[in-house]
Amino acid sequence: MGHCRLIVDVLIIFISTSTATLDDHIPKVCSYASCQQMSNSSSVFNYCKTQNMTISGRCCFNSTTEGSHTLAGIDLSFCNISREQLKTFKTDLKMVQYLVLDANPLYNCSVEDFRGLTDLYFLSVPTTCSCPGELTAWEDITIQGNITTCQGQITCRQDLVPCPASSHCSGNGPGLAECSCDEGNHGYKCSRQGKFPTAGFAIGLISSTIVAAGVMWCSHRRHTKME
């Protein structure tokens, strides 16, 4: 009887997971309480409609045949969002392509405010917050009134990120890039071949820590006896 009950519970969990709707995937940022009412002429809405995306609240989603939903566009204009608040949304925004941040108290923005947004193609911000990475990170930057528009994120310009041999450039958001070793290489400038000796490194680190701890313990004991 117990085995039958377990099987039934597993089936219920599987069915509920596989039949999850878009409502189960909508992040709270899509209905952020501080936002003013959004116009139906929002550029995000227009973008979503041309891409045949699903619109919910201030967001639009890419939906797959497998039932998964990815946040692709969001309009956060007139939401009274500061740089500190923007950081709290970054987990939800990590795959966003179209981001509108007009009319918010954003000042002196940096590339760190948009770290991890590797899929971002369109960004609009108030003129008090320039495009992260500026012309080295975007194909086109336009200023019109109080809005700065950044389009076409540039990832890994070779003249700015000259990676050594046996490595490649990996983007990490607008204006952010780093060199990563190709598979089978590691070490300084990726010049060493083979996999990194994780086990040997860990054993060496643990051994040296134990030895250092032993020396400190003996020293402390000797000092205590002398007193």
Image (cartoon, rainbow, N blue to C red):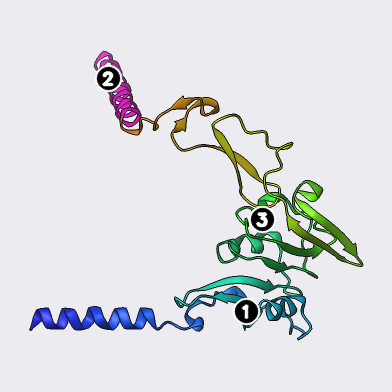
Q: Which residues are magenta?
A: 200-227
Figure quadrant of the C terminus: top left
Report how far apart the C-alphas of labels 2 and 3 lie in the structure: 54 Å
Q: Mark 3 or mark 1: which comes first in sequence?
A: 1
Q: CA distance from mark 3 to mark 1?
A: 24 Å
Residue 142 in the magenta stretch? The answer is no
Amino acid type for the residue under numbered disc 3: Phe
Compared to residue 145, the image places residue 14 above or below, namely: below
Quarter of the image containing the N terminus?
bottom left
Give the residue drawn at x 71%, y 47%. 175
**On the image, which quarter does residue 40 sit in?**
bottom right
Which numbered disc covers residue 224? 2
| Pointer 2 or 3: first along the chain | 3
User: Please, what is the three-letter code of the amino acid marked with disc 1?
Assistant: Met
Residue annotated with mark 3: 114
Classify residue 217 as left or right of residue 35.
left
Q: Nearer the viewer, mark 2 or mark 1?
A: 1
Closest to the camera, between mark 2 and mark 3, is: 3
- Name the quadrant containing residue 139: bottom right
Q: Mark 1 = which residue?
A: 53
Residue at the spot 87% in from the left edge and 60% down from the top edge: 142
Horizontal relation, residue 85 to residue 224: left or right: right
Q: Residue 219: within the magenta?
A: yes
Q: Pick whichever, 168 or 9, lies toward us.
A: 168
Distance from the alpha carbon under mark 2 to that under mark 1: 72 Å
In percent of width and height, residue 21 lies at 47, 83
